[in-house]
Amino acid sequence: MKALVCGISGQDGAYLAKLLLDKGYEVIGTSRDAQISDFKNLTRLGIREKVWLESMALNDFRSVLQVMHRTQPDEIYNLAGQSSVGLSFEQPVETLESIMSATINMMEAIRFLDRPIRFYNAGSGECFGDTLGVAANENTPFRPRSPYAVAKSAAYWQVANYREAYGLYACTGILFNHESPLRPERFVTRKIVAAACRIGKGSKERLRLGNTSISRDWGWAPEYVDAMWRMLQGDRAEDLVIATGINHSLGDFADCAFRYFGLDWREHTDIDQSIFRPTDLPFGCGDSRKANKINGWKAETRMEDVIQKMIDAELEYEK
Amino acid sequence: MEEKGHEAQGKCIVQIDPRYFRPAEVETLLGDSTKAKVKFEWTPKTSFNELISEMIRENLKSAEWYELLKKT
């Protein structure tokens, strides 16, 4: 079996590649420029040499078609595109094109090649917007509140449309937040863990955070990429919500991380209004019962364990 | 799919062509504009039949003009 993983240099791409390789797949990964990307995450997971890398420009249909035609994959996992909600406010069009237009390019290429390729698209719990304190499931309407969420929502509907109109095996995983040691430090979870480790070891720095009362459903990334693989193995393509179902505030996250070192996060943190987002979701939580029913997936790792694992890895990595 | 429309002399002038079927279609579209009515008193004034009559009237004018041009 051959899998094409678009966006292989990110957190999910690396863990997914490892999962697929362990299952005996041949894995081809893409990034915009495979020659100059460093693929640090692949190296860190020890799979850099086991993956074939191709350059693919998502917004260039020619590039997408050429790569798919050349690599002849059985499964395609689209994890590529601008991935920062915060940055999307600054780059709304780049975000829309790299997420929505890219998805259309890939599905059009699949249609053109006319081969039975299974397509997984990366959706996001951000699409639901403010669910007023209720965990979102597959029937919850989308109310996106950022250019990133709008782009992901549009891509979701494109996938649904292509599945219905052309009979493609194409589906979207609506994944809620999933963290790991491979998260870049600009993601607040890793930023908090890294700061907690440094401060725990004696650093006098201050952690700068924005709105700490926002709450999210945080899971463990390696479990979530397993959900992605499961979604392409069924008889039917189905869009599914992937989440732990448990909600915590960012303050809780910071509290848990700092307590690992016997510290109170509030004593080491400054709240900076300038990094509050123009619009933000006060509450995010997902209900994955349908995924559990359809393919048996369930989140085993809770936020506290995620933080524990991230801290252990951070301390290990620094050695 | 086999439906046809004929004019008085029996010539077929409306027919179903599968090429016009969309890959995915919405069978029913119906909107509720109560909010617009409440917020700024908008209501539709032109009925379905009036709409069609108006469009036919205009198209008939250009069709007659076209026929006239063909004769000259």
Image: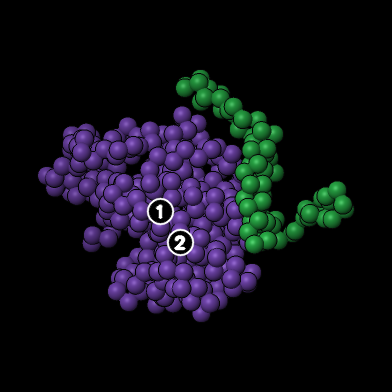
Above or below, B71 against A138 in this view is below
3D distance between C-alphas at marks 1 and 2: 9 Å
Name which of mark 1 and mark 2 comes first in the sequence. Answer: 1
Q: Which chain is purple?
A: A
The subunit letter for the residue under badge 1 reads: A
Q: Residues within 10 Å of mark 2 (few under 14, many from 20)?
A: many
Q: Position of residue A277 (x, y in %)?
A: 29, 39
Q: Looking at the picture, how far across and down is residue A200, in whole percent?
A: 20, 45
What's the residue at 45%, 59% (across, down)?
A: A101
Note whether A74 is above or below A178 in the view shown. Answer: below
For badge 2, the amino acid type reads Ala
Nearer the observer, A290 or A145: A145
For the residues tagged 1 and 2, is the chain the same?
A: yes
Is residue A221 left or right of A266 when viewed as pictured? right
Q: x and y percent of residue B42 in the render?
A: 52, 24
Q: Which residue is the site of mark 2? A: A102
Front-most of A83 and A215? Answer: A83
User: Label 2 marks which chain's residue?
Assistant: A
Please state which of residues A237 and B54 is positioned toward the viewer in this rendering. Answer: B54
Q: Residue at x 58, y 28 (%)?
A: B44
User: Could you tell whether A281 is left or right of A118 in the image?
Assistant: left
Residue placed furthest toward the bottom: A70
Can residue A309 be seen from the camera position used here? Answer: no
Q: Is residue A114 above or below residue B35?
A: below
Q: Which mark is residue A96?
A: 1
Crowding near the residue tagged with mark 1, few <14, some 14–19, many ≥20 C-alpha atoms within 10 Å? many
The residue depicted at 66 percent of the width and 56 percent of the height is: B68
The tint chain B carries is: green
> Quarter-wise, where is residue A52 in the image?
bottom left
Quarter of the image that includes the N terminus of chain A? bottom right
